[in-house]
Amino acid sequence: MKNSVTAYIEFSFKGKTYSPSLSINLDEFLQAHGSIPSLYPLIANNNDFDLYSYEYEMMEAEPLQFRDAQGMVSDFITDGELDIAAFEKAWHEQQLAEELLAVANRNMGIKNLHENPELKQALLEAYRLGQESRH
């Protein structure tokens, strides 16, 4: 399932209240960059805020809020706040699990690693050994 969310910020500037937002496909960011970049400039650009203005500074002073979450990202939002680090970690673990399942399926016809925890553990250890040898 696609991981998407709407990030928004509510702030006041010169007596006017603003609520700029941006709908984000988090999978695209994570696949392209491995992490979620700073969202403030993305929200500002999407809502025609100058990145070198007092208005933008006021926006940056307020916390990001999140709504309309779809996918597993919804498990990482509490009271409108997203635990980005925990979500990124879980996302990467899910991607690895899918890749390991593909290997097990291709080589052994296994369709569910949860039913084969020993194999899953062996594949994870082999993956980690490969990662360590690259460093």
Image: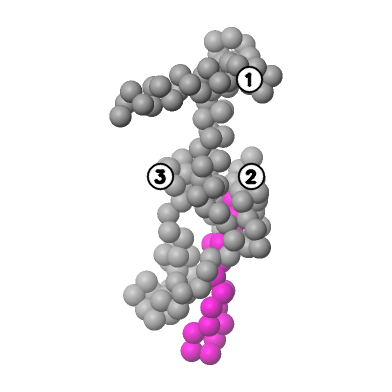
Cα–Cα gap, marks 2 and 3: 19 Å
Camera-side residue: 110 or 21? 110
Q: Which tag is nearer the camera, tag 1 or tag 2?
A: 1
Judging by the rendered image, the residue that carries numbered circle 2 is 72
Judging by the rendered image, the residue that carries numbered circle 1 is 117
In the image: residue 109, left or right of residue 20 = right
Quick one: quadrant of the N terminus?
top right
Farthest top residue in view: 108
Q: Residues within 10 Å of mark 1 (few under 14, many from 20)?
A: few
Tell me which segment is drawn in magenta. Answer: 4-22
Asked if labels 2 and 1 touch by Cβ distance under 8 angstroms, the answer is no
Judging by the rendered image, the residue that carries numbered circle 3 is 33
Query: Which numbered disc, 2 or 3, marks the residue that appears first in the sequence?
Result: 3
Task: Report the amino acid beneath label 2.
Answer: Met
Query: Which numbered disc, 1 or 2, marks the residue that appears first in the sequence?
Result: 2
Farthest bottom residue in view: 15
